[in-house]
């Protein structure tokens, strides 16, 4: 590939620059991989060095420290208490106590079982008292995996806290040696609304994210490497266990799926293609039509601007499940539109809005325009009004017509400002569960694909497929989590590519 | 188009051409308005229809009446409505507090973990939320917060993960000049006082925007709500309950009742929304520009 200098690059036309950038991105991939490799190597190097430094620091703190520090290595917080920082010391001590109790009360068990996810499934044992066989439950794979992950999180937190404890002892010694006073508990509390205020503010939100987002995601990623499904629920029927990369092989292999249908990979490929087409069309139809409507309302001489806007905004206000479900039924086989058209005698057969693959896909995109234009109208109105009017003034004096003004002024400005929005909107549409599920539920069913993981329809996105796999008869949780990881990979790759091509502002501080 | 316009201009002068183009714009706007409003007008009309409870080929009822609303009153709809209202109210308060804490901190403080934290949350956001449904359900069911007790469970999950959606309000906080904070700090205010006395009064639009979106969200929450409350009508929210009316075995009896329910659900939310429209527009626009 030809490398351009800065000056040559500036001489290219817009389109050439764009293609050049994309080409440069893909040509840069090998280089990027190489540099990634070296970054990783360097990271490991510096990581090792850091760990070594930490160890050296811990050792010197121990050998050079006084007896209070030495006791603190075993009894966390002892040094703080002995030096008068009662509050901090008690918190350290309490954390250690909780940790030890937890590890003995169950943490050790969960951790030891994590390698196998349980060995003993439910058994039928003879109960002499009842003179009957009763079921006894033993290991629970689900809980082992869940609490095993939690225990690992807890151990990491403990190591971090222990290290902080050691650091604090060293620091306190230094401060006392230099003749200054240590912070009292009162000072600590005060700093929580002042210097350390961010810790107070972030404590609650981050705890929530850790427990209800991070932990579940880690869990579900791990599920992708097990055989967890309806038949292996890990408790009442069979335990589940680690299967390595088998599930990824299943999804990406070319062999036929169960039930003699098409292979998983073919189904996956079809759904992925439609997901990308859908996301692209849904994003850009809305974007341009929304901008068009906004420009019409903004046009000089148009009256009742507020009324037009309010009418459109109404659709934003009404909960989507009402409008989408209603419209979905309106276009159904025996819905209002078909019945009315047949009553009028315009058609003799109901139009197959949701029964034919192409009809359904087009209808979904059309109705999505109906849903999406009001948002885009709102967003673009504000930005359009911010474009300096003298730009248009001078363009008009130079003899530019409406279309030229649009392509040379409005569009570049809009694309520049809304670039990041378009990206989030694209990935949001890829995962637009509501519109697809409430309108079609994925229908019409794709008979070729039905052998692989539940009934798959022509309008199914990856996300609705994931939902169907999860709630389907076989409850193939492992496959659902593989699909989820795939969605993540696709979204991440697209974001990465677009961010490298986008001219928009990446530097946050410049913006403020 | 433009050539025609130019010739028109020559013949009739600028004003007349403008009038013609305005006429077409009005025409288009009227068509758009009709298309956008029609489904809602239809819902309202059909909710008053008495003679048939299923879909028919006409819109204006032959027999008007409140039958569908009475049917609504005698069904579980009251429970669903109350459930949704409680969830919406609790979310509005708690999600607002959490999101504002998060966005204010990330906008104003510069601490060591800030960059990594934001990058980490960006990556987390790329995982589909649907993925974690299974485990969240199991965790909630261990806590006893599913089926009949779905309401606190839904509030818990909704609020706990809401910190991820800090982008819009962070964008707003970024626009408030930092010199205000610094001036107050010089005068001896603590960080907490800066937030409470200076930033919050200025942030009124974004606070209202956050409350509004947090309140409106639960009214349309379907997937997770259904998963959590599955099979127990007393734990449904309006979306889950009313969706069940449109399944194949119920639709013939309940279609017009669904329309009536839709009207009842939409009225308060729409009124609230139209009153606070200004703030919503500000938030949405700001969010898009900041990305």
Image: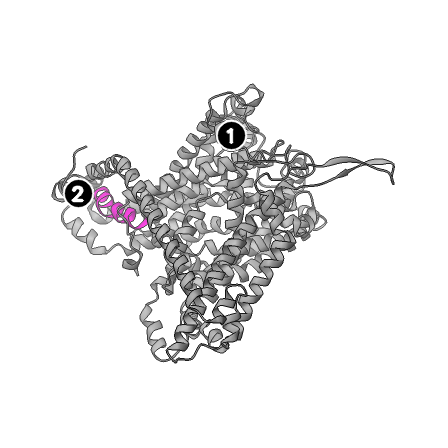
User: Badge 1, how many Cα within 10 Å: few under 14, some, many 20+?
Assistant: some
Counting labels gives 2
x and y, in percent, of residue B162 in the image: 50, 55
Task: Name the one closer to the observer, B2 or B136.
Answer: B136
Read off the chain for label 2: B
Q: Which mark is residue B10?
A: 2
- Helix, strand or loop at disc 1? helix
Q: Is residue A213 magenta?
A: no
**Residue B195 vs residue A261: left or right?**
left
* Residues at marks 1 and 2, CA–CA distance in whole angstroms: 74 Å
Q: Residue at x 41, y 52 (%)?
A: A309
Q: Residue at x 37, y 52 (%)?
A: B288
Bounds of the magenta segment? A400-418
Q: Which mark is residue A429?
A: none
Q: Is residue A404 magenta?
A: yes
- Helix, strand or loop at disc 2? helix
**Residue B148 vs residue A2: left or right?**
right
Q: Which residue is mark 1?
A: A246
């Amino acid at each position: 590939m030809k490398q351009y200098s800065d000056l040559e690059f500036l001489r290219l036309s817009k389109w050439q620059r764009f293609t050049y950038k994309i080409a440069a991105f893909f040509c840069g991939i090998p280089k990027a991989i190489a540099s990634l490799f070296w970054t990783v190597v360097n990271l490991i190097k510096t990581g090792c060095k850091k760990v070594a430094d930490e160890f050296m620091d811990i050792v010197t703190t121990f050998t050079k420290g006084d007896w209070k520090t030495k006791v603190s290595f075993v009894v966390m917080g002892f040094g703080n208490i002995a030096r008068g920082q009662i509050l901090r010391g008690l918190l350290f001590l309490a954390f250690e106590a909780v940790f030890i109790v937890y590890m003995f009360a169950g943490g050790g068990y969960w951790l030891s079982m994590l390698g196998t996810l349980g060995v003993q499934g439910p058994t039928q044992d003879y109960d002499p008292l009842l003179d009957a066989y009763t079921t006894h439950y033993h290991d629970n794979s689900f809980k082992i995996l869940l609490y095993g992950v939690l225990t690992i999180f807890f151990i990491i937190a403990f190591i971090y806290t222990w290290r902080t404890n050691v650091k604090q002892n060293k620091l306190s010694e230094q401060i006392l040696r230099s003749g200054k006073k240590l912070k009292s508990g009162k000072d600590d509390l005060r700093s929580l609304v002042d210097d350390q205020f961010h810790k107070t503010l972030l404590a609650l939100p981050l705890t929530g994210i850790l427990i209800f987002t991070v932990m579940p995601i880690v869990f579900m990623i791990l599920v992708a490497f097990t055989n967890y499904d309806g038949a292996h629920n890990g408790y009442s029927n069979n335990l589940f266990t680690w299967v390595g990369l088998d599930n990824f092989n299943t999804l990406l292999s070319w062999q036929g799926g169960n039930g003699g249908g098409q292979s998983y990979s073919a189904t996956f490929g079809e759904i992925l293609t439609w997901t990308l087409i859908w996301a692209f069309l849904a994003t850009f139809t809305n974007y341009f039509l929304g901008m068009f409507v906004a420009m019409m309302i903004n046009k000089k001489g148009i009256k009742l601007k507020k009324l037009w806007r309010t009418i459109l905004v109404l659709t934003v206000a009404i909960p989507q499940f009402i409008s989408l479900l209603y419209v979905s039924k309106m276009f159904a086989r025996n819905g209002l539109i078909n019945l009315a058209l047949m009553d009028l005698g315009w058609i003799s057969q109901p139009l197959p809005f949701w029964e034919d693959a192409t009809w359904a896909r087009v209808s979904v995109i059309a109705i999505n325009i109906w849903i999406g234009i009001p948002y885009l109208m709102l967003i673009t109105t504000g930005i359009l009004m911010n474009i300096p009017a003298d730009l248009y003034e001078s363009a008009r004096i130079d003899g530019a017509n409406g279309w030229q003004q649009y392509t040379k002024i409005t569009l570049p400005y809009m694309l520049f400002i809304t670039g990041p929005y378009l990206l989030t909107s694209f990935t949001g549409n890829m995962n637009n569960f509501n519109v697809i599920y409430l309108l079609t539920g994925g229908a019409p069913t794709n008979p070729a694909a039905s052998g692989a993981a539940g009934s798959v329809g022509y309008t199914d996105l990856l996300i609705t497929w994931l939902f169907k796999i999860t709630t389907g008869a076989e409850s193939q949780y492992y496959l659902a989590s593989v699909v989820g990881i795939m969605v993540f990979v696709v979204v991440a790759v697209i974001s990465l590519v677009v961010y490298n091509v986008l001219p928009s502002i990446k530097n946050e501080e410049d913006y403020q | 188009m433009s050539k025609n316009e130019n010739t028109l201009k020559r013949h009739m002068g600028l004003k007349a051409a403008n009038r013609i183009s305005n006429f077409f714009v009005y025409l288009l706007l009227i068509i758009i308005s009709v298309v956008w409003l029609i489904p809602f007008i239809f819902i309202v009309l059909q909710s008053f229809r008495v003679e048939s409870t299923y879909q028919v080929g006409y819109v204006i009822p032959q027999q008007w009446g409140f039958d569908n609303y009475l049917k609504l009153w005698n069904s579980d709809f009251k429970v669903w409505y109350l459930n949704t209202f409680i969830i919406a109210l609790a979310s509005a308060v708690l999600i607002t507090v959490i999101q504002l804490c998060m966005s204010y901190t990330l906008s104003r403080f510069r601490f060591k973990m800030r960059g990594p934290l934001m990058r980490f949350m960006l990556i987390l956001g790329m995982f589909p939320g649907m993925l974690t449904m299974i485990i969240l359900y199991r965790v909630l069911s261990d806590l006893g917060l599913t089926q009949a007790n779905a309401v606190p469970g839904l509030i818990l999950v909704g609020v706990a993960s809401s910190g991820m959606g800090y982008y819009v309000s962070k964008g707003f906080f970024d626009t408030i000049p930092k010199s205000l904070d610094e001036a107050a700090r010089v005068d001896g205010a603590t960080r907490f006082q800066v937030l409470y006395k200076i930033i919050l009064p200025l942030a009124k639009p974004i606070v209202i925007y956050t409350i509004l979106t947090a309140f409106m969200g639960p009214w349309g929450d379907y997937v997770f709500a259904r998963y959590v409350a599955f099979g127990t009508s007393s734990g449904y929210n309006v979306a889950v309950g009313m969706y069940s009316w449109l399944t194949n075995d119920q639709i013939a009896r309940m279609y017009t009742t669904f329309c009536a329910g839709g009207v009842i659900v939409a009225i308060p939310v729409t009124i609230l929304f139209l009153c606070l429209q200004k703030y919503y527009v500000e938030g949405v626009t700001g969010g898009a520009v900041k990305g």
